[in-house]
Amino acid sequence: MGYIKGLKCRECDREYPVDPIYVCEFCFGPLEVVYDYEKIRQSLTRDKIQSRPHNLWRYRELLPIDGEPFDAFHTGFTPLIKADNLAKLLGIRELYIKDDSVSHPTLSFKDRVVAVALAKAREFNFDTVACASTGNLAHAVSAQGAKAGFKRFIFIPASLEYSKIIASLAYEPNLIAVDGNYDEVNRLCSEVANKYHWAFVNINIRPFYAEGSKTHGFEIVEQLGWRTPDNVVVPCASGSLITKVWKSFKEMKEIGLIEKVNTKVFAAQATGCSPIVAAIKQGIDVIKPVKPNTIAKSLAIGNPADGFYATQVIKESKGFGEDVSDQEIIDAIKLLAKTEGIFTETAGGVTLASAIKLIKAGYIKKDSLTVLCITGNGLKTQEALHGHTVKPYYIKPNLSFFEETLKEINKAAS
Amino acid sequence: MAVKVKIPIPLQRLTQGKDEVDGAPGKVIELINTLEKQYPGLGERISEAGKIRRFVNVYVNEEDIRFLKNEDTEIKDGDEVSIIPAIAGGTKTVNSR
């Protein structure tokens, strides 16, 4: 069993064995998993995938695990929803929502990466898992780590939305709230990871962890009937998801599950933290770090680890990037909720708001099939909508009060 | 007074264990090239074809050279240069701004 050949530096191609390492010793570039695609091509077919249960392990040959998966049997295979109401409103032919806001168990796409990271941490015989997180990852590691029986250390910026902190604490991990932003938390974690023999899912397990994101893309292809969309809009924080979605499409072609990849990939960021989109718009490869200032805290990474590779995906796929204001994010969250009945978190608002601008500007053609990657649930960031929603009608428990209110409502609607 | 250059742990093997070495004023890339002569192999790890490697961050007096003039940033006597591997996105950049 096993389809992994080893690890390789993305920058200088130096090869490494399969170990909990993540940086090239020579040039400090990130390491990536190398697969034996020929062997996978011979083993993995559409029929085989379709015969398997509806979870992310149905693509296990393309994931970096050696043994049988031991957990996360309900993670992945989230709905791909045809968003006709929204499509009509935006004047676009076909629009789909890849809805990871209902991911099991913690309502964001991070369940995917953590499922793979913990499977790998078990293979490496770690007893403690850890992460640096903007919230969603903290939930996924806290929850899945609890079920799998790992000790858990979760590092977050102390300024996170309170509801996001509670949603980690419920699983009783060791939660370390750091007085600093995500980039500072991440830097601290790099030092901790050097000193303690723990599986930091997004540091020393990163090459394996990041591969879990591919399942988001594999599912889009399978759910569209084994074809890639014309356009896909992906929110960017570290830039990892967008590179892995692109990689997932290319891998499916590589092993012969689909014939071609004709997709333009679009990056979505909040204007208050848009180092990747800024580089895309300027047409340069250099990512200039920024100090984040946006309500989209789950995307607030000012110094994105995979930012350079994200810009390369845009270039290679002939896509583009767009950034949006906090108000546009709020408006988009509300729009998705009232047209498609999906309540997404701020990152989802970033994706939809960016897509709207890209459609208006003609980067996304109206006569096309577009997928929006909605990666998290709105219940986690309810604070973002405080003061921005419609108001409830407060009445006394009496039919006449209700009928008076009803008249008011009908009057306002007419 | 010379330029102080801070060497990260992974590169200290090439500087005989020294965590700080002296350099001469001039452009960043000139400094790297001079260091290569003193400590063979060091330059190659930090730069390639005249450019700082993508996953190596260089700071002059705590400021990321990407906010200055990149490889052409001028270093004066008494300046402090830090060479830091980027590592998974976490750097000191945000602190120093």
Image: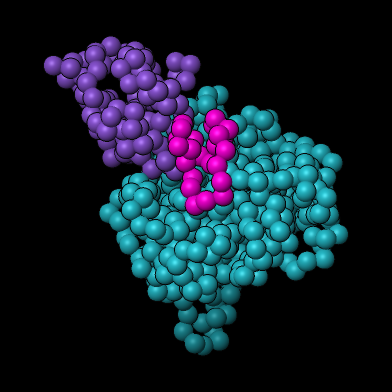
Q: Main secondary structure of the magenta part?
A: loop
Relative placement, left or right, of A271 versus B28 is right
Looking at the image, residue A242 lies above or below residue A380: above
Relative placement, left or right, of A43 versus A103 is right
Relative placement, left or right, of A236 versus A231 is left
**Residue A11 part of the magenta-drawn span:** yes
Looking at the image, residue A253 lies above or below residue A66: above
Colour of chain A, in one word, is cyan
Colour of chain B, in one word, is purple
Q: Measured from the top left, where is residue A283 in percent x and y? A: 55, 24
Looking at the image, residue A326 lies above or below residue A166: above
**Residue B78 part of the magenta-drawn span:** no
Q: Which residue is situated farthest in the left direction here?
A: B1
Question: Residue sitting at 83 percent across and 60 percent down?
Answer: A48
Q: Which residues are magenta?
A: A9-32
Question: Residue sitting at 34 percent across and 15 percent down?
Answer: B37
- Res A167 seen here: no
Q: Measured from the top left, where is residue A385 in percent x and y? A: 46, 59
